[in-house]
């Protein structure tokens, strides 16, 4: 069964304390891995798409990397405004429907 | 100002009642999706539609129904058959071009509670 697992469930950092969020997946045929940011009570906001092992994407203090089994979202020198839930999702198989399988998310809190 | 609009923001359902959640987009996107989000769980797909007048069941379609009469609109009805409807409901859309990249854009969500 296709599965996406994110860890840790929750992460508390001090402002400026760098860390990484993990997304591990067991899928039958990866056709893309996606990171979203979700603020409380709002819809997810697209951050990155990664398609092949070794690929990296960066945006401000965030960098996403991909291996054959997992993806990491590295947060460098985070600020309080980076506090949010970060969701990972994968597209699998041969379907052209755009269906995604989501992990349960990591809730990040950055304290000043 | 293009985007996806979900309404209402909060909705309360009584026992045995059907309720309808609205999702409208002005992005000219072809595909639309409905997800359910429960605390501590990832988003789960309820229904999706790739074209007007056509839609498919997702992973948890039981107790829900949809229609796609217009490209811009994809309403979700939570029926009385859905015994545990309390959740945060998210609508998303994407264009045919974006499907290849799997970039889905989301609305702000509707929080449904049972009275």
Image: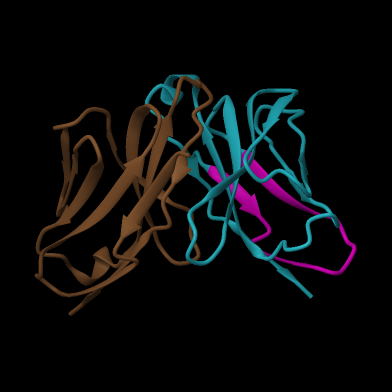
Q: Is residue B92 left or right of residue A26?
A: right
The reply to whether residue B41 is visible in this rendering is: yes
Predominant secondary structure in magenta? strand
A8 and A97: which one is in front? A8
With respect to residue B51, does B60 lie above or below?
Answer: below
Q: Is residue B78 left or right of residue A34?
A: right
Residue A95 percent across, percent down from the top left: 50, 22
Residue A33 percent across, percent down from the top left: 32, 37
Q: Which chain is brown?
A: A
With respect to residue A81, does B52 lie above or below?
Answer: above
Residue B25 percent across, percent down from the top left: 59, 37
User: Farthest residue toward the bottom?
Assistant: A112
Segment colored magenta: B4-24
The residue under the point 34% across, 43% down is A25
The residue under the point 70% across, 23% down is B52
The verdict on residue B12 being magenta is: yes
Q: Is residue A69 left or right of residue A89?
A: left
User: Farthest residue toward the right?
Assistant: B16
Residue B90 percent across, percent down from the top left: 57, 51
Q: Is residue A29 left or right of residue B84?
A: left
Residue A85 sits in quarter: bottom left
The residue under the point 42% across, 32% down is A91
Quadrant that contains the C terminus of chain A:
bottom left
What colour scheme governs how the chains and residues are painted in the rendered image of this protein? Answer: by chain
The verdict on residue A77 being magenta is: no
Q: Which chain is cyan?
A: B
Residue B61 sits in quarter: top right
């Amino acid at each position: 069964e296709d599965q996406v697992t994110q860890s840790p469930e929750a992460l508390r950092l001090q402002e400026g304390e760098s860390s990484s969020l993990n997304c591990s997946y067991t899928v039958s045929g990866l056709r893309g891995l996606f990171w979203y940011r979700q603020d409380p009570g709002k819809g997810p906001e697209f951050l990155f798409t990664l398609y092949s092992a070794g690929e990296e994407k960066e945006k401000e203090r965030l960098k996403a990397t991909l291996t054959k089994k997992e993806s990491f979202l590295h947060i460098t020198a985070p600020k309080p405004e980076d506090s949010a839930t970060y969701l990972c999702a994968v597209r699998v198989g041969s379907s052209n429907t755009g269906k995604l399988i989501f992990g349960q998310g990591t809730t990040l809190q950055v304290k000043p | 100002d293009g985007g996806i609009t979900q309404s209402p923001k909060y909705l309360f359902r009584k026992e045995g009642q059907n309720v309808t959640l609205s999702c409208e987009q002005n992005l000219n996107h072809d595909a639309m999706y409905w997800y359910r989000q429960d605390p501590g769980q990832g988003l789960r797909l309820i229904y999706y539609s790739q074209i007007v007048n056509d839609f498919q069941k997702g992973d948890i379609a039981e107790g829900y129904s949809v229609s796609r009469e217009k490209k811009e609109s994809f309403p979700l009805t939570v029926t009385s058959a859905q015994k545990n409807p309390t959740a945060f409901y998210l609508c998303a859309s994407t264009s045919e071009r974006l499907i290849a990249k799997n970039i889905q854009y989301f609305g702000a969500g509707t929080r449904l509670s049972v009275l």
